[in-house]
Amino acid sequence: MNLSHLSDFLLYSLVINYLILIIWFVVFVFAKDWMKRLHGQWFKLSDQQFDAIHYGGMAVYKIGILLLNLTPYIALHYLK
């Protein structure tokens, strides 16, 4: 595997992961009641706990994308 293939892989991974993050955010904003009912079947959470968990999860996911996809992609881009 050469640098070009690895760079392409990281770019596609970056795009897919950001799409997942955007979908998660859109569902959270526009279908929050549905998500709360779905998760409420398994967990007893207040509205504040539910919001905090999802906000924190999105933050951790975004940091993961930045560290594991974007940073290596930029580094490989400069190596080309």
Image (tube, helix red, strand yellow):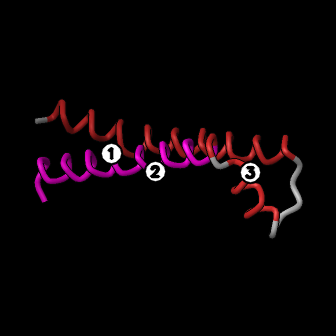
Tag 1: amino acid: Val
To which residue does mark 1 refer? 15
The C terminus sits in image quarter? top left
To which residue does mark 2 refer? 20
Sequence-wise, the earlier of marks 1 and 3 is: 1
Give the quarter of the image for residue 69.
Answer: top left
Sequence-wise, the earlier of marks 3 and 2 is: 2
Q: Nearer the viewer, mark 3 or mark 2?
A: 3
Q: Nearer the viewer, mark 1 or mark 3?
A: 3
Rendered residue at 14%/53% (across/down)? 5
To which residue does mark 3 refer? 33
Under circle 1, the secondary element is helix
Q: Is residue 12 magenta?
A: yes
Tag 3: amino acid: Asp
Left or right of residue 39: residue 59: left
Q: Which residues lie in the magenta part?
A: 1-28
| Contact between labelled residues 3 and 1, with CB atoms less than 8 Å apart | no
Q: Distance from label 1 to label 3 (Cα)? A: 28 Å
Q: Is residue 5 above or below residue 40?
A: above
Q: Distance from label 2 to label 1 (Cα)? A: 9 Å
Give the quarter of the image for residue 74.
Answer: top left
